[in-house]
Image (cartoon, grey):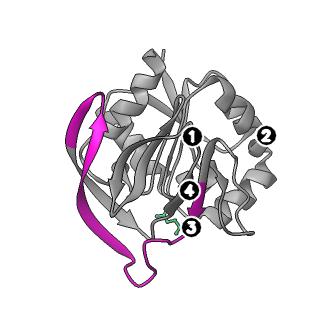
């Protein structure tokens, strides 16, 4: 049985639960290291990356997630993307280093707190139009050679994959469109 963990230290983890339920997938909230046991994959939600970073240390989950990610896929949305990066660009956020990315927090402009757009994304070999909501979103400012860019906005990557991990600047859990969660789940079959 496939159960997907959702890191529930802070942020909009409940919206990911609903997105997974739409795909008829079981999920489990993760707040303590033993809650990773038996999971097929993990989602790190949007929220406040400084808070999640501190909670990763307090909960003892930091090293456990790094070890989990060697075997299993991890997906990060917005603050989750910042936490998956190699370099967060902010000393207050100690990232997990799962993806070879450098980030600028709130890099889409502080004055524009949120916006909605349509992206053209490379999903399972098809060019797909995808609704995307950005909320105080992180900007990816550098990508390493192993990072695949699946969608860009204004010349900056906003949806990336590296090995079995997937991450994005926007919030696929806030739109009814389940294709991003479906793409992440395809990593389980690979
Ligand atoms: N601006 C937040 C941060 O830097 C991320 C915002 C979000 O997840 N919607 O942590």
Name the residue furthest left: 129
Please identify, in this view, whether the residue under mark 1 or under mark 2 is nearer the observer.
1
**Number of marks in the image?**
4
Which residue sits at x=42%, y=32%? 184
Residue occupied by mark 2: 63
The verdict on label 1 being within 8 Å of ligand 1 is no
Residue 170 percent coordinates (x, y):
39, 57
Left or right: residue 6 compared with residue 175:
right
Asked whether the residues under the numbered discs 1 and 3 touch, taking CB atoms below 8 Å apart as contact, a structural biologist would say no
Name the residue furthest bottom: 111
The span from disc 4 to disc 1 (Cα, nearest Å) is 10 Å
Please identify, in this view, whether the residue under mark 1 or under mark 3 is nearer the observer.
1
Asked whether the residues under the numbered discs 1 and 2 touch, taking CB atoms below 8 Å apart as contact, a structural biologist would say no
The first of marks 1 and 3 along the sequence is 3
Which mark is drawn over residue 57? none
Residue occupied by mark 1: 145
* Residue 112 lies in the magenta-colored region: yes
Left or right: residue 185 compared with residue 54:
left
User: Please, what secondary structure does the residue beneath circle 3 have?
Assistant: strand
The first of marks 1 and 2 along the sequence is 2
The span from disc 4 to disc 2 (Cα, nearest Å) is 25 Å
**122 vs 82, nearest the viewer:** 122
The span from disc 3 to disc 2 (Cα, nearest Å) is 24 Å
Residue occupied by mark 3: 104
* Residue 118 lies in the magenta-colored region: yes
Q: Does 167 sit above or below residue 190?
A: below
- Badge 4, how many Cα within 10 Å: few under 14, some, many 20+? some
């Amino acid at each position: 049985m496939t159960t997907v963990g959702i890191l529930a230290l802070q942020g909009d983890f409940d919206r990911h639960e609903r997105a997974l339920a739409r795909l008829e997938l079981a999920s489990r909230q993760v707040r303590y290291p033993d809650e990773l046991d038996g999971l097929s994959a993990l989602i790190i939600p949007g929220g406040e990356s400084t808070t999640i970073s501190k909670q990763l240390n307090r909960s003892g989950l930091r090293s456990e997630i790094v070890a989990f990610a060697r075997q299993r896929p991890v997906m990060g949305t917005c603050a989750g993307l910042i936490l998956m990066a190699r370099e967060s660009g902010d000393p207050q956020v100690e990232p997990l280093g799962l993806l070879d990315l450098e980030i600028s927090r709130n890099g889409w402009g502080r004055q524009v707190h949120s916006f909605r757009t349509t992206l053209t994304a490379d999903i399972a070999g098809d060019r797909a139009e995808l609704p995307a909501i950005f909320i105080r979103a992180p900007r990816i400012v550098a990508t390493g050679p192993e990072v695949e860019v699946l969608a860009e906005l204004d010349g900056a990557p906003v949806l990336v994959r590296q090995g079995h991990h997937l991450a994005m600047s926007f919030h696929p859990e806030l739109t009814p469109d389940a294709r991003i969660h479906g793409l992440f789940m395809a990593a389980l079959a690979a």
